[in-house]
Image (cartoon, helix red, strand yellow):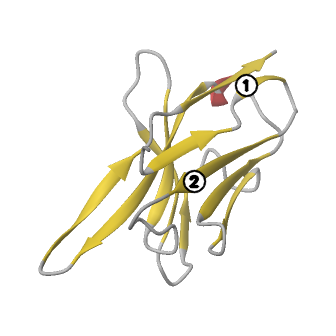
Amino acid sequence: QEPVVESGGGLVQLGGSLRLSCVASGRISVSNSMGWYRQAPGKERELVVEVTSGGATKYADSVKGRFSISRDNAKNTAYLHMNSLKPEDTAVYYCRCTKIQLGRPPRDLWGQGTQVTVAS
């Protein structure tokens, strides 16, 4: 089983909404620092939102007021709530989790990504 798995992507119309899920397993916890990123065709991967273990968030300017992140620690699942979607939000969305390793630096673990396509 992959330690980080995203789901919830799909095709949505302009102005629509989607909720992406990121399920962590094994010794990975979404309560640690984690984030959502996206990569559009021909572009570099970019930050969508990061959240620290303490709950502090950092959103990309392009999604502020439209996207929000939440976590359900009991389910070890993080969510990306996306509203008022635009065609420029079309991308593969990735979840990044942090694996805490005793005596070693924290390690980033990425999911395989989920495609979001916004039709105009």
Q: Position of residue 84 (x, y in %)?
A: 83, 39
Q: Is residue 56 left or right of residue 7?
A: left
Residue depicted at x 46% and y 49%: 4
User: Mark 1 highlights which residue?
Assistant: 10
Residue depicted at x 76% and y 50%: 66
Q: Amino acid at mark 1?
A: Gly
Instruction: Farthest residue to the bottom: give it.
Output: 54
Instruction: Name the element at disc 2.
Output: strand
Residue depicted at x 73% and y 25%: 10
* Front label number (1 vs 2): 2
Please say if 115 is above or below 41: below
Q: Position of residue 27 (x, y in %)?
A: 38, 67
Name the N-terminal-most of marks 1 and 2: 1
Residue depicted at x 84% and y 39%: 17
Q: Is residue 65 left or right of residue 79?
A: right
For the residues labelled 1 and 2, the Cα–Cα distance comes to 17 Å
The front one of 2 and 81 is: 2
Quarter holding the C terminus is top right
Count the marks: how many? 2
To which quarter of the image does residue 77 belong?
A: bottom right
Q: Residues within 10 Å of mark 2 (few under 14, many from 20)?
A: many
Q: Amino acid at mark 2?
A: Val
The front one of 24 and 19 is: 24
Quarter holding the N terminus is top left
The front one of 13 and 110 is: 110
To which quarter of the image does residue 119 belong?
A: top right
Please say if 33 is above or below 1: below
Q: Position of residue 86 (x, y in %)?
A: 75, 29
User: Mark 2 highlights which residue?
Assistant: 23
